[in-house]
Amino acid sequence: MKISRPTKIKRIIFLDFDACLVHDINSEQALTAWELKHECKHPNNGWFNSPESLDLELNSIQRNENVYNDFTMRSDSNTLTVLLTNRPTALELEVLNALNHLNVHLHELTFKSYPKELKSTRIAKFIVDYPDVKEIVFYDDLYGHFLDCQPLVEEYLKIDFNFILVQNETLMAV
């Protein structure tokens, strides 16, 4: 669910969706269940780009409580919370439904808008839009996404960047 944006933003928390804010979805099991239910092969080449991948009847989508508790503990009235997923924009409604089901409330949702778009590109847009930001917190399960942010760390020296690698239940500052 999207919530109203704070007026004075000093911190932005970015959260990856799959295998981070939500536990890794068993795509093989869900795809098999879909194919059995419909008695045919799934027509989409990319399961995670299809709405069925977020079907709450096919998938056991569960919130990662460690990530949820950590980011809510860091949030205050000057914090903007942003979903930073590489799922396509076409799945916005399904992602919103999953977040509502999990009782997760964020200010913004961002989706991958073209195939080679980096998450760091979207983070940079927020830094430009909110010039008073003092801290960026970024949760992701892929270390390479943090490496892509290195130019931002070097360019925006007045911002404290905190990268948190999520591996199942474990959160590691990197």
Image (cartoon, rainbow, N blue to C red):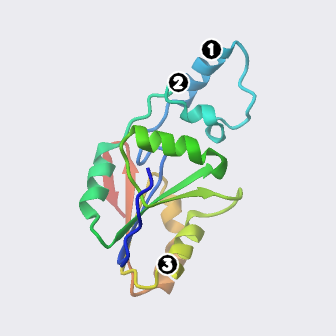
Amino acid found under the numbered disc labelled 2: Leu
Contact between marks 2 and 1 (CB within 8 A): the answer is: yes
Dividing the picture into quarters, in which one does residue 22 lie? top left
Q: How many marks?
A: 3
User: Mark 2 or mark 3, which is nearer the start of the sequence?
Assistant: 2
Q: Quadrant of residue 106?
A: bottom left
* Residue 10's disc number: none
Q: Secondary structure at mark 2?
A: loop
Point out residue 92 in the picture as x, y percentages from the top left corner: 58, 48
Q: Nearer the viewer, residue 171 or 97?
A: 97
> Can residue 161 be seen in the rendering of this structure?
no
Residue for badge 3: 127
Per the image, label 3 sits on a secondary structure element best described as: helix
Is the C terminus in the top left, top right, bottom left or bottom right quadrant? Answer: bottom left
Where does label 2 land, which residue? 58
Q: State the residue lying farthest toward the left.
A: 73
User: What is the three-letter code of the residue carrying label 3?
Assistant: Ile
Residue 37: assigned label: 1
Which circle's residue, 1 or 3, is located before the other in the chain? 1
Say which element carries label 1.
Answer: helix
